[in-house]
Structure formats: structure tokens, C-alpha cells
Amino acid sequence: MISELDAHLATVTRRLETREEALSINAARSGSSRGREVQEPPSPVRTEFQRDRDRIIHCKAFRRLKHKTQVFIAPVGDHFVTRLTHTLEVAQIARTIARALNLNEDLAEASALAHDIGHPPFGHAGEQALAGVVPEGFRHAEQSLRVVEKLEDLNLTWEVRDGIVNSSKVREDILAEAWGVPSTIEGQIVKISDAIAYINHDIADAIRAGLISEDALPAEVGQVLGRRHSERINTLVCDIVDASWWATGEEEPPGDRKIRMSAPVWAAANTLREFMFQRVYLLEARQEETEQAQRVVQMLYRHFLEHPEEVQSDFVIEGDPQWRRAADYVSGMTDGFALSTAQRLGEVGPPSQRLPG
């Protein structure tokens, strides 16, 4: 005889399945996922993608994002964006677009929450530093996949892992396909949501840091995207929804089945992105800060490469070559832990002499 609990759980399962069945024909469905590397019995109260999301937000690597740099290294103010707040903004934007296009927002959210989970300390300065010394190179998207697959062993679905490893972009174009194209439309949404989030919140941080003013933004950006943070995000999101309406299943899909923007908004977004590279990301006045951060990361990597007995962490895998263990250990550090470790090893001065914020 079926218990009341079993009956209730069966009802929950049917509701979840019904909701996914109502999604666009182009949506990814957890019921038809390519699965996990290790098969598991299904959850009675969550879809497979919801389960992935929960595993990500409960893991230690996700928690450490709150103490990792987005753009400004070890900032003093309370309102600068961190890698964690950036991640939450990406997830929010991705869910909004996925929902509007009747796609699977649970998949979009899960991939977004883990897309930067392997980022090293000090943002892209730290990534570039490791890329210069690690034998097989270093890219944060590949490290993020390694974190969820190996170091945290989350056993996520194939679709979420695909969205994570293919989330990076090159400088030249906000819709560039270099470094991989996600296999699902939801993964494509995460990739573009990442750019929407960072070019906008980085403007606010740059203004807060006194590097630029709102008036300094290119005139084309204000005319096409809007002059305020919320206006720009709203314009970009609404334009993507309109230009990608085929994803709802209500229009014939294009041959490439890609998430896209209209030509004017695409051009304005690229103009804004290039402006940020020139005026903020690669600003000469910030190079001393960037170079010091890189020296700290490379020093730490070389130190732990030469002193494997000092790597006391469960964020490495026994039996891996020492270069891999050193890279995993250093990339998992928060900004503060990296600085305090470097100070302990005599490589940076006391707090007043640390990286400027």
C-alpha cells in the first residue's frame, strides 16, 4: 500500500515533469539529459538540473568566491563587485533570458553559478600568472570544470558541465565563438549573460574607484543601450530575447541556432566592452597592481611546486603530478589567503604595503 508521503512525492515528480514538458521544443530537459558520469537514483523533489544547482551552492569552492577579485584587487570599499556577486548577477540575467524564451532556467542557473568557480585569486591577473607557469597552461573555464568534476566531485550532469567549460569569451567580440560554443541554448545564454553582467557592474566599480565618469562612456553606448546601469542591462536583455525569439519554438530557427543580438545593440555592446578594456581593464595606472598580483601568484605556485609537503589541503588530488597539485592549491586560494601566505613566506610586506585597492 502506497504511503501518504510516497503519494505526495509522486505528485511533486509529476508536477516537475509537466513543467518541463511545457518548455520550448528547443529547451534542454533534465529528463533527456545525457546524464552524470556516475549514475544516481533521481530526486523525488528536484529535477536533475535543480539538483546540480544545489550541489554547486553548497560546495566550498563556491563559498570562496566571495573573497575573490572580480576586477579591482583587494578593494577597500564594501560595494565593489566580488567574484561571488558577479556570479549571482550572471545567474539572475541568465534566468531572466531563459524564462522569457521559455527555456530551462534551472539549467541556465546551474551553469551560471559554476562558470567561475575555478577562478584563481586576483581575477584575470591571477589567471594570466598561472597560465605563464603551469606546464599545460591555465584557463579559468577549464579549471572550473576540473573543480566540479574532480576537486569537489559534484557529479553534475553533462549539460551543466558543457555550459561551464564553454563559458569564456575572447576580447574581440561579445558574441565570439572562440574557446567553445555551448551545446545547449541555455549554455549560450550563460555565456552572453556573463558579458552583460561584467561590462555593466565593472562600469559602476570603475566610477566608484575614480577611474572614469558616467559621462566618459562613448556616446553610441548611451544612445543605444541607455545611460544608467539598469537601462543598459534592460536593453541588452530585451534585445537578446527579441533577436533570439526563434528559441521559443514559435518561429523557424536559423541555420546556426545561436543566441544573438540585433546589429545596433551588438555594435554598441562591443564598443562598450572595448572601452572598458582600454580605460579600465588594461589601464596603465593599474599595471603595478596587476604585476604585483601576478608576482604573488607565480611565487606561490613555484614555492608549492618546490615544497610539496606544505600543500595541506583537501582541494588537491593525491597522486597528481606536483605541478597540478600546486596549480589546484593556488588557484583555489582567496585573495586574502594568497596575500597572507605570501606575507608569511616573506614575499610581501605588512598590510599597509599590500596591493592597492
Image: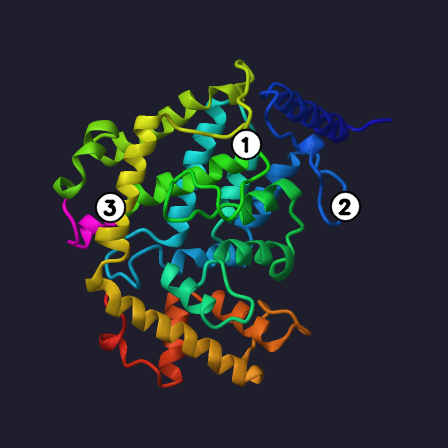
**Picture residue at 32% right of the left edge, 51% below the top:** 81
Q: Is residue 211 magenta?
A: yes
Which residue is more in the foreground, 48 or 24? 24
The disc placed on residue 6 is none
Look at the image and tell me in which quarter the C terminus lies. bottom left
Q: Amino acid at mark 2?
A: Gln
Numbered range of the magenta stretch: 203-213
Q: Is residue 125 above or below residue 52?
A: below
The residue wearing badge 3 is: 275
> At numbered mark 1, what does the secondary structure look like: helix, strand or loop?
helix
The spot of residue 340 in percent (x, y) is 37, 76
- Residue count near mark 1 (Cα–Cα under 10 Å), binned few <14, some 14–19, many ≥20: many
Q: Is residue 73 above or below residue 326?
A: above
- Residue count near mark 3 (Cα–Cα under 10 Å), binned few <14, some 14–19, many ≥20: some
Q: Is residue 249 above or below residue 132?
A: above
Which circle's residue, 3 or 1, is located before the other in the chain? Answer: 1
The spot of residue 203 in percent (x, y) is 24, 45
